[in-house]
Image: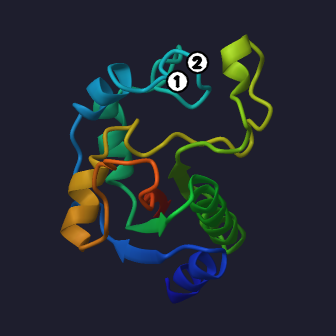
Amino acid sequence: MDAYIELALSNGAAHAVAVTPGDVVFDGRTLLKCMFGCPDWGFGHTCPSRKHFLKPWVFEPLLKKYATVLIIHAHDKRVAQKCAMAVEKAAFLAGDALALSMSDCALCNECAGRTGEACRNASQARPAFHSVGVDVFGTVKKLGLPLYPLKDESEEQNWYAAVWLN
């Protein structure tokens, strides 16, 4: 696990913390925040509004089968995703065939879903972990990591990604 933490940090993460799925706060109400607060609802290819996207209550028992979750904190959405993908790839190459990263997708400047096109990066696009029923605020609060609603756009942002590992 130390190698994965170091990999995340070397890719720009501010923090990387390994926890168990039991440390992750699950709450299906996160879907409500997606539906009634996200401008990408109905468009994004990794969005829970997409046809055939599993509901949070279906994701929870699947995710709880993993042994470890690496929570990655960065101050930039693209950095968080880059770190998570690097760890997922390293874990896969080390034999963890089911390693799975989750982060707010930042691969494209504008999601192809907005124009009805197919995902341009389907092999790399992953859902945000709040879209699968993870209460990100509750989870990182338990870990002592920073996350709070921004009152002004000039405030430093906190983005989180997760990598589910066996």
Residue appearing at x 61%, y 56% in the figure = 81
Residue 49 appears left or right of 87: left
Q: Is residue 119 visible?
A: yes
- Mark pair 2, 1: CA separation: 5 Å
Q: Confirm or deny contact between disc 2 and disc 1 (CB under 8 A).
A: yes
Residue 93 appears left or right of 99: right
- Toward the viewer: 4 or 29? 29
Q: What's the image's color scheme?
A: rainbow
Judging by the rendered image, the residue that carries numbered circle 1 is: 40
Q: Is residue 57 above or below residue 4?
A: above
Residue appearing at x 44%, y 62% in the figure = 156
Q: Residues within 10 Å of mark 1 (few under 14, many from 20)?
A: some
Give x and y (percent) for residue 164.
46, 60
Element type at marker 2? loop
Tag 1: amino acid: Asp
Residue 116 appears left or right of 15: right
Give x and y (percent) for residue 120.
80, 32
- Toward the viewer: 157 or 13? 157
Residue appearing at x 71%, y 44% in the figure = 107
Q: Is residue 153 above or below residue 1?
A: above
Q: Residues within 10 Å of mark 2 (few under 14, many from 20)?
A: some
Q: Is residue 60 above or below residue 118?
A: below
Q: In the rendered structure, find residue 43 and report the number of the disc placed on it.
A: 2
Disc tally is 2
